Image (cartoon, rainbow, N blue to C red):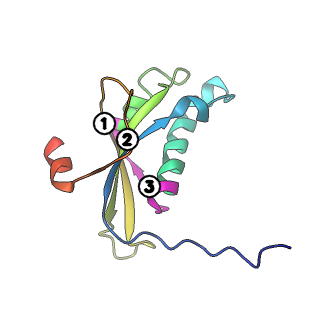
């Protein structure tokens, strides 16, 4: 029996900041050399859209530079990303919220888990 229709998940309404580790290596497996870095940017956006629940995802320049740091072919295997769900200031915007993705530098990825970041500490680090 087919389902009657999937109910669409309502977008999240609260402003929150979280840190994630994204394994780009498995997401870029089988992608041609000249498409790897552009695909990495798309995969980060896709991941942010999935976990934060907003269709408007903006990539910070530091994250973009990190993804492209080793060239178009040799994208880093993992990246630590801070997703901040923020209120959209534009009145004509379709959505009330957007997600800003920024790079978080870490020495090693061992033992890191998804963490919710307090907004006051997040702004102090930047």
Name the residue that disc number 2 marks: 81
Considering only order in the chain, which callout, 2 or 3, is on the residue closer to the N terminus? Answer: 3
Considering only order in the chain, which callout, 3 or 1, is on the residue closer to the N terminus? Answer: 3
Residue 42 falls in image quadrant: top right
Disc ID at residue 104: 1
Give residue 79's position: percent from left, percent from top: 42, 33
Indicate left or right for 54 with 104 as reference. Answer: right
Q: Residue at x 52, y 20 (%)?
A: 74
In this rendering, the answer to whether 74 lies above or below 51 is above
Name the residue that disc number 3 marks: 57
How far is disc 1 from disc 3 in space, using C-alphas? 17 Å
Element carrying mark 2 = strand
Q: Is residue 6 magenta?
A: no
Q: Count up the numbered dots.
A: 3
Indicate left or right for 33 with 101 as reference. Answer: right
Q: Residue at x 34, y 76 (%)?
A: 91
- Position of the C terminus, as image quadrant, is top left
Q: Which residues are magenta?
A: 50-62
- Position of the N terminus, as image quadrant, is bottom right
């Amino acid at each position: 029996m087919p389902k009657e229709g999937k109910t669409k998940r309502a977008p999240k309404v609260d402003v929150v900041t979280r840190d994630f580790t994204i394994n780009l290596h498995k997401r870029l497996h089988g992608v041609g050399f000249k498409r790897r870095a552009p695909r990495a940017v798309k995969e980060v956006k896709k991941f942010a859209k999935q976990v934060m629940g907003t269709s408007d995802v903006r990539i910070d320049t530091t994250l973009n530079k990190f993804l492209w740091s080793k060239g178009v072919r040799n994208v880093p295997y993992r990246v630590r990303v801070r997703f901040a769900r923020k209120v959209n200031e534009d009145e004509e915007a379709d959505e009330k919220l957007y997600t800003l993705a920024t790079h978080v530098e870490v020495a090693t990825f061992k033992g890191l888990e998804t963490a919710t970041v307090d907004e006051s500490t997040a702004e102090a680090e930047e």
